[in-house]
Amino acid sequence: MARGQVFHAVGKRKTSIARIYLRSGDGKVTVNERSFDGYFPLHYQPIVKKPLELLGLAGKYDVVASVIGGGISSQASACMHAIAKALTLVADTNRPTLKKARLLTRDSRVVERKKYGHKKARKSFQFSKR
């Protein structure tokens, strides 16, 4: 990897979209121009850093993320997906490890739409015979 080279990737989950810029550094993570600890609650931080931890690169790359849409949970998963995709651009040898851990697969589950005549997507109104 050339010094100062920036790797860019986009990750998605539900209605969240995360744009990631990965460059060599000391492991600093910034999300929407805020600190990593200030943006994501403690529960979601390991999810975001999972690809870096898996490859043992946690302190070697700085991550700058721009995330829009969805909630905190789907934003964390979108960031994880984008970081994994960016790490495949860094080195082709990272791909098999990330693929085996299913980090390169976009989780395509989204909320099912509400149907007419129903309370929610599948739940019906209470049936009354009389």
Image (cartoon, rainbow, N blue to C red):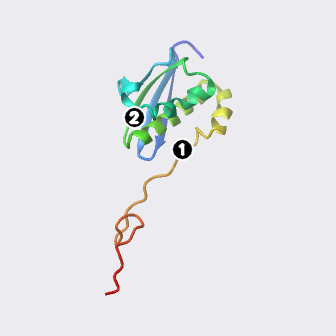
Give the mark nearer the N terminus: 2 vs 1: 2
Residue 14: x and y in percent read 44, 47
Residue 4: x and y in percent read 51, 14
Q: Quadrant of residue 119?
A: bottom left
130 shown above or below 100 = below
Location of mark 2 (residue): 67
Q: Residues within 10 Å of mark 1 (few under 14, many from 20)?
A: some
Q: Quadrant of residue 87?
A: top right
47 shown above or below 29 = below
Amino acid type shown at disc 2: Val
The residue that appears at 39% across and 34% down in the rendered structure is: 67
Residue 49: x and y in percent read 52, 29
Please state, as top left, top right, bottom left or bottom right, where the C terminus lies in the image.
bottom left
Relative placement, left or right, of 76 versus 54 is left
Asked whether 20 or 46 is in front, the reply is: 46
User: Hey, which residue is sitting farthest left in the picture?
Assistant: 130
Calculate the distance from the C-alpha at mark 2 to the C-alpha at mark 1.
Answer: 16 Å
Location of mark 1 (residue): 106
The residue that appears at 58% across and 38% down in the rendered structure is: 103
Q: Secondary structure at mark 2?
A: strand
User: Hey, which residue is sitting farthest top in the picture?
Assistant: 3
The residue that appears at 51% across and 31% down in the rendered structure is: 46
Q: Residues within 10 Å of mark 2 (few under 14, many from 20)?
A: many
Relative placement, left or right, of 3 versus 14 is right
Q: Secondary structure at mark 1?
A: loop
User: Hey, which residue is sitting farthest bottom in the picture?
Assistant: 130
2 shown above or below 78 = above
The residue that appears at 35% across and 24% down in the rendered structure is: 33
